């Protein structure tokens, strides 16, 4: 596990895309007709990776938070 954490520490971009990809897949899973959606899946994947000590740089974390909380143009009407 330490080798994996060391690898993702050296390659933070790969970590971000892994979290995004797995989160998108998690969000597509439907249980009893309810799914998390892509944003909820990515949030859950980020929490799981963070639990194991894998984190992104602070500026990337701030940018991700900005993208997560900003409304999309279709929601503004």
Image (cartoon, rainbow, N blue to C red):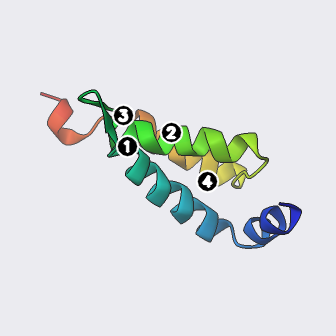
Contact, CB < 8 Å: mark 2 with mark 3?
Answer: no
Query: Which quadrant is the C terminus positioned in?
Result: top left
Specify the label residue 60 is tagged with: 4
Asked if residue 18 can be seen in this view, the reply is yes
Q: Nearer the viewer, mark 4 or mark 3?
A: 3
Specify the label residue 69 is tagged with: none
Q: How would you rate the neighbour count of disc 2 (Cα within 10 Å): few for under 14, some for 14-19, many for 20 or more?
A: some
- Quick one: SS at disc 1? helix
Residue lying farthest left? 77
Query: Residue 29: image x %, image y %?
Result: 34, 43
- Quick one: SS at disc 4? helix
At 43% from the left and 41% from the top, the residue drawn is 41
Q: Is residue 32 left or right of residue 57?
A: left
Sequence-wise, the earlier of marks 2 and 4 is: 2
Query: How far apart are the alpha carbons under marks 1 and 3?
Result: 5 Å
Disc 1 target residue: 27
Please name whichever residue, 35 or 58, is drawn nearer the observer in this view of the structure: 35
Sequence-wise, the earlier of marks 4 and 1 is: 1
Sequence-wise, the earlier of marks 1 and 3 is: 1
Query: How far apart are the alpha carbons under marks 2 and 1?
Result: 9 Å
Q: Is residue 64 left or right of residue 47?
A: left
At 37% from the left and 36% from the top, the residue drawn is 70
Specify the label residue 36 is tagged with: 3
Quarter of image, res 48: top right
Sequence-wise, the earlier of marks 4 and 3 is: 3
Disc 2 target residue: 43
Sequence-wise, the earlier of marks 2 and 3 is: 3
Contact, CB < 8 Å: mark 1 with mark 3?
Answer: yes
């Amino acid at each position: 596990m330490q080798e994996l954490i060391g690898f993702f520490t050296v390659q933070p971009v790969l970590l971000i895309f892994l979290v995004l990809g797995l989160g998108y897949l998690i969000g597509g899973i439907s249980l009893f007709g309810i799914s998390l959606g892509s944003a909820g899946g990515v949030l859950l994947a980020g929490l799981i990776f963070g639990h194991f000590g894998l984190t992104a740089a602070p500026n990337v974390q701030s940018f991700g938070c900005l993208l997560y909380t900003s409304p999309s143009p279709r929601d503004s009407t």
